[in-house]
Amino acid sequence: MIIARLFYEFFKIGLLTYGGGLAMLPLLQEKAVQFAWLTEEQFADMIAISQSTPGPIAINMATFVGYDQAGVLGALFASIGVILPGFIIIFIVAKFLHHFNEKPIVKAVFIGLRAAVIGLILTAIVNVAMVSIVDVQAYKEKKELLSLVDAKSLILFAISLYAVLRYKKHPIYYIVTAGIIGIIIW
């Protein structure tokens, strides 16, 4: 039964999200927490791991969750579930888009979809930041506003953001460097 649930839920994620892996993050997070596949913290860790390994984040996450929940068959069916809708949609679009791609309504649809994808990606950023930078537990214990933010995480985030924007190197450099810094300061 878990294999069917994994396939179905990851199929829905693949079907209902447009814009690739990062746009899928809010729905991936919702389902992972809803079905207790991952905690919020594990989800944030999984994003970091998925971003540092080859392949799309949704497939990496589907494979990990599927394997964790139901072994190799779970990984296989969750991965197929998340891939299949995109494959079907691309096949249909490729078949017919060249007939319609210059129509104003089709252009308008794609403009709207791009805007929605930005919103989904920003939602994912906020959700990961809430787990990675914001320390609600420390705030509850100390009742001090400054304790709401994990200063070390915020500084590492700011340095990473600056480096990415300034130097434009491959993401693996920043991921490895942040991991090493994390080992040193935590």
Image (tube, helix red, strand yellow):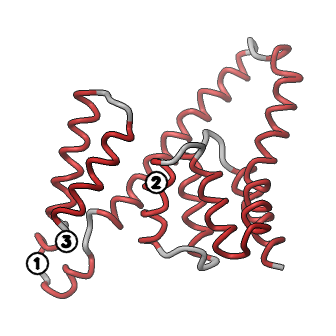
Q: Mark 1 is on which residue type?
A: Glu
Foreground disc of the pair 1, 2: 2
Residue on which the image places disc 1: 144
Q: Are marks 3 and 1 in contact (CB under 8 Å)?
A: yes
The answer to which of marks 2 and 3 sits earlier in the sequence is: 2
Q: Mark 3 is on which residue type?
A: Leu
Q: Residues within 10 Å of mark 2 (few under 14, many from 20)?
A: many
* Residue 44 percent across, percent down from the top left: 43, 63
Residue at x 34%, y 47% (from the top left corner): 175
Left/right placement of residue 143 relative to residue 96 reads left
- The outermost residue toward the top is 102
Q: Mark 2 is on which residue type?
A: Ala
The circle drawn on residue 124 is 2
Left/right placement of residue 15 relative to residue 53 reads right
Residue at x 20%, y 52% (from the top left corner): 156
Q: Quadrant of the N terminus?
A: bottom right
Residue at x 33%, y 59% (from the top left corner): 129
Q: Relative to residue 44, is residue 159 depicted above or below?
A: above
Residue at x 15%, y 53% (from the top left corner): 155
Left/right placement of residue 97 relative to residue 47 reads right
The residues tagged by marks 2 and 3 sit, at their Cα atoms, a distance apart of 20 Å
Q: Relative to residue 117, is residue 141 depicted above or below?
A: below
The circle drawn on residue 148 is 3
Label 3: which secondary element: helix
The residues tagged by marks 1 and 2 sit, at their Cα atoms, a distance apart of 27 Å
Label 1: which secondary element: loop
* Residue 85 percent across, percent down from the top left: 80, 46
Label 2: which secondary element: helix
